[in-house]
Image (cartoon, rainbow, N blue to C red):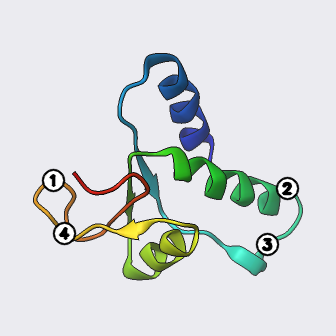
Amino acid sequence: MRANLAAWLLVRRTNIPWVAHVHGWLGSTHAGRWILYEGIDRQLIRRANLVIVGSDATRKEVEAAGGEKCGGCAQCGPVAVSFTGCR
């Protein structure tokens, strides 16, 4: 979450494309501040140009957050999710 927050802050100032990376979220297996961090991360990645994920399960979670599976093009690879459309 911290890296995605730092990237989002940088992108706001520079307007450069942002590729986020999500390893996975823990969902109901944690509590307290971690639930807050996960919620923030789910909102932040919606602003990324592209999200690279580590597994098919994580891809499905990111899609559930509003992304679209990228078609596995040469630019994105087989495990990517786009919130702005695959280019």
Q: Single out the residue that lies furthest toward the top.
A: 13
Mark 2 vs mark 4, CA separation in Å = 35 Å
Q: Residue 32's quadrant in the figure?
A: bottom right
Which badge, 3 or 4, is on the more N-terminal residue? 3
- Mark seen at residue 22: none
Q: Amino acid at mark 4?
A: Gly
Mark 4 vs mark 1, CA separation in Å = 8 Å
**Foreground tag (1 vs 2):** 1
Which badge, 1 or 2, is on the more N-terminal residue? 2
Near mark 3 (Cα within 10 A), the count class, few <14, some 14-19 or many ≥20, is few
Q: Are marks 1 and 3 in contact (CB under 8 Å)?
A: no
Q: Amino acid at mark 2?
A: Arg
Which badge, 1 or 3, is on the more N-terminal residue? 3
**Foreground tag (1 vs 3):** 1
Above or below for 17 versus 51? above
| Residue receiving disc 2 | 33
| Residue receiving disc 3 | 30
Above or below for 67 versus 3? below
- Mark seen at residue 75: 1
Horizontal side, residue 72 vs residue 55: left or right:
left
